[in-house]
Every structure is written in structure tokens, then in C-alpha cells.
Image (spheres, rainbow, N blue to C red):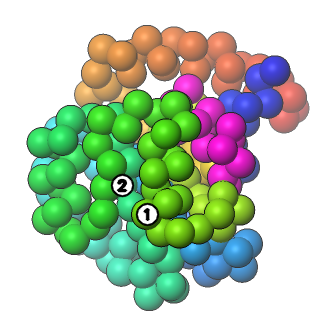
Amino acid sequence: MHQVFVPNLEVQSIYEIDPLQLRALGIDVVLTDLDNTLVRTFEKEAPAELIDWLNRFMAAGLRVMIISNNSNVRVGSFARRYGLPYIAVAKKPLKFCFQKAMTHFNVRSDSVAMIGDQLMTDIFGANRMKLYSIWVHPIERKTDGRWTKINRAMEGVVLKWIRSKQN
Ligand SMILES: [Mg+2]
């Protein structure tokens, strides 16, 4: 039952993800969470390292979209600044936002990866849609919002189970 929370790939940071490796897996589209995945929850600007990362992904032929449960103001202002398509107030892990993204790019689930820092929303949502799920350790947990804190408590239980299977 917990399998739906197990990511296909686990990394410490987005910078460990190799765009060419994703291409080799047949990935065309990368959906990514924003807060605590790309930047800290209140960070308005992308560091140079992130812009470089985005450029490398796009140079590899990957199309990138931000999918976040945060507000239109927060997600829209960040995404527009860097010319990225986005879905705000996405309500992950519900399926609708992922379906909307696949329709936007006209792709099937087997060519889509989803990157995110939360098992209960990003990874669960991606897995139930059969996307390639990449779990990144959160950049900074102390800026988590109220709902995220609740999700993290459940995440702790799931994580214990995942680790027990890995060992
Ligand atoms: Mg997040």
C-alpha cells in the first residue's frame, strides 16, 4: 500500500539530476514543484545556479513546467520571471493538475517526470499518474507552511517504512 509513496529516484538536491539521463529514459517533459524544491518557500528569485540548471535541462530538449499548490501570486510571479509555464493552486496529489500538464504539452505519462520535495503530494501524485517520480530532499524545512507540516508528519511514517525496505 505504501508503494505509491516510493519515488523512482531520490536525490539530495535538484542539482544531482542529470537531464541527459532523463532523456535516455524517454522523458520529454519535466514537471517540478517550486517551494523547497527549486528555491526556499519565500525566495522570489532564482539563484544563478538554478538558471543554469534550467538552461541545461532545456538544452537537453526537456520542457519544464512548475506545478505548485501555492497561490497564483507566488507561483505566477516566479514562473513568469523565468518564462516558465506553470500551474498554481494545483491541488497535488489530485490527478487534475497532472492531466492538465500532459494536455498542455500533448504527451503521455511515460514521457513525463515529476520533481518534488513532498512524498504525500508530489510523489504520491506522480506515482498514481505513472509519471517518473523524483523525490528531492527539501531545501529548508523550517519555512514549511502549516499544511506542509502536517504532510511532513505523515511523510515521516512513510519514510520509516521506505527505509526499512531499503535495508
Ligand atoms: Mg514543496
Whole-percent x, y for residue 107 in the image? 59, 68
Q: Residue at x 36, y 16 (%)?
A: 147
Residue 16 lies in magenta, yes or no?
A: no
Range of magenta residues? 120-132
C-alpha distance separating marks 2 and 1: 12 Å
Identify the residue at horizontal 57%, vertical 13% (top origin): 154
Mark on residue 104?
1
Q: Is residue 67 above or below residue 120?
A: below
Which quarter of the image is occupied by the C terminus?
top right
User: Residue 2: in sight, yes or no?
Assistant: yes
Mark 2 Cβ and ligand 1 under 8 Å apart: no
| Most frequent secondary structure within the magenta stretch | helix
**What residue do we see at 49% from left, 39% from top?**
96
Residue kind at label 2, given as amino acid type:
Ile
Q: Earlier in the sequence, mark 2 or mark 1?
A: 2
Q: Nearer the viewer, residue 98 or 66?
A: 98
How crowded pointer 2 is (Cα within 10 Å; few <14, some 14-19, many 20+) is rated as many
Cβ of mark 1 under 8 A from ligand 1: no
Q: Are marks 2 and 1 in contact (CB under 8 Å)?
A: no
Report crowding for label 1: few under 14, some 14 to 19, many 20 or more residues within 10 A (C-alpha).
few
Q: Which residue is mark 2?
A: 66
Between label 2 and label 1, give the one nearer the viewer: 1
Q: Is residue 7 above or below residue 52?
A: above
Disc 1 element: helix
Residue 19, picture quadrant? bottom right
Element marked by disc 2: strand
Q: As displayed, is residue 140 above or below residue 61?
A: above
Residue 130 covered by magenta stretch: yes
* Picture quarter with the N terminus: top right
